[in-house]
Image: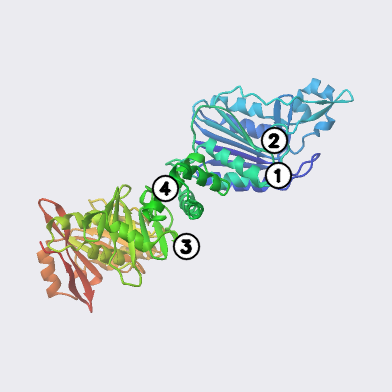
Amino acid sequence: MKRALLIGNQNYEKLDKLSFPENDVKKLKDIFEVIGFSVSTYVDVSFENMKEIISIFSYNVNDGDEIVFYFSGHGYHFEGNNYITPIDCKDYHEIEYADVLLLAYEDAAKVIDISLICDYLSKNKNGNNILVIDACRNIAEIKMYNDKRISNLVETSILNDNIFIAYVTSLGEFTIDNSIYATAISDMILRKYQTIDDLFNCVSDYVYNNSDAKIPCISKKTNKTYCFIDECNYCYEVEKQYYDEMFQIYIMVSSELSEVNIKDDFLNKYIYDAVKSLIYYPVNLLNLYIKKVITAFKEKLGLVYLLLEDEFFTTANIHVDSIFIEAKFGNGYRYDNNNFYNFNQCVEFIRNLQTKSSNVYIYKNKTIILMPYKNTNPFFQIINCQNNESLIRLVENPIRKIAKNDKTSEIMKLLIDNIENKKNILLVGDPHTNKEEFVSAFSEYFSEKDRILLINEDKKIDIRKGQISNSSTTFDDLMSKNVDELLNRMELVNKENITRVLYQNKAFRIDDEVFKALNKIEHCQFIATYDRDINTFLNQLKMQPKEHISSNYDLIVILCNCKEIGSFVHSIYVKENNYFDCLIKVDY
């Protein structure tokens, strides 16, 4: 389990009041919750309460947990120990030696020894224990027998295994009452591939170069490689920062490249030295980006090369003036083309790649489609085939084997336009055709904000984007209800603001009560599958255009089966003036 305890003390009774600890705690609480931590926060805590809070928190730690302890407030160093202070601590200048002999130093001064927290966490041998101390580490002057004794400048040794401590400042130094340390952590923690050492090295560089504070430091006794971001907590915020920083680094590196003429042997180091202080990024990751941008310049692809090498997006639409990236989370990320790439040079590069068919090309594990377009809005689409079952595989591969004239690009463009514009679509074919697989591929083009009503039968539809409504059910369940029950059910569904309805039917008629009820759902797109012999269906379509089941749809996709290759798109019919015309037919 991931657990975090964050304490911020600022309204001290005997020490100077601070301005930022409460805000620091709130800021880090939000960011740690984003990446899956269960977070406990406390502000302005007294000595007794602070001891109890830390004790209870530590008691609940289990071996294997990921633990973060953060403190923002006053602190100091004395006789080899680092102390953090509750709001009712004593001024260390006034601590009497007699009290120390009687009570022990921590109780006499009312402070918390960081080594005590390390001891509490020592039971977590197989997890990760991370302490972040955002407090001063100046050397305390203690009043002893009317004289002042100054502690030796000796760093605390960590006796416990599996401890990582990050300090905002070096031993013996004061820090500044500002939020720069917490801000740097929250700004940098969401990076993929970044180890905890990478993170705090970047944070240290940033704090040192952007404030009057001394160099932050790390003290650790662990050989583990730990990353805050992994597959389990990969989320929208992580994804967005990943693409934002990709574009930011590209701008920085390409700006330097355009102004230098250096041999390859020295180019990488020169660029790294030029940009390292502009973006505080892990050395190995920044060097990797630099190499990719240099290659992008050589290939004349600009930032598009970085997307071709990227493994995390679903699709990327590249227009002359903008890039729109669809990935796992969010509604996509748009970046206007501020000299990120030259569109025509990218198209020229693509046309020299291995081709699958007209306007469909292969780059490593990517499929690139040069979309049919009007002259006013040219674009191409990059589909990451590794992460997702792509619609292009379903549409293109079978057609390529049987079609006399390639129809891939035309079919793709038509399907995607109708999905994104929420036109009603009916997929028709015999029970052995893979209609449900097509619907699953359609969902790649849904929005994350879509609310989907799924009426499922015996075949699985895999929804990859959008949220499935709790009202989703089976067709048999709806068939078992009387008319009033159906209408009441649809009234409840309408309150959910359904945007798309997906359903499967082996056989249904336009006078079915279920069909009538479904069509009372407001403001949504219908995508349905229909098990039917296609010749019978097409004959009925010609004879009964108004009464036929298809009358509720804008687009009909006919699927056919071929023994050697499986299902393929046989034809597509589009509604015009309440009649369906065959717009595309695959000749084979």
What's the residue at 45%, 50% (across, down)? 239
C-alpha separation, residue under disc 3 versus residue under disc 1: 35 Å
Relative height, residue 383 to residue 126 (above, below): below
Q: Could you tell me the amino acid type at mark 1?
A: Asp
The location of residue 262, given as percent across then percent down, is 47, 47
Question: Mark 4 or 3 closer to N-term?
Answer: 4
Question: Mark 3 or 1 closer to N-term?
Answer: 1
Question: Mark 2 or 4 closer to N-term?
Answer: 2
The location of residue 10, given as percent across then percent down, is 73, 44
C-alpha separation, residue under disc 3 versus residue under disc 2: 55 Å
Question: Mark 4 or 1 closer to N-term?
Answer: 1
What's the residue at 42%, 41% (across, down)? 231
Question: Mark 2 or 1 closer to N-term?
Answer: 2
The label number, if any, that marks residue 212 in the structure image: 1
Q: Could you tell me the amino acid type at mark 3?
A: Asn
The label number, if any, that marks residue 49 in the structure image: 2
Residue lying at the far top in this picture: please name it: 101
Q: Could you tell me the amino acid type at mark 4?
A: Lys
Which residue is denoted by mark 4 in the rendering?
A: 292
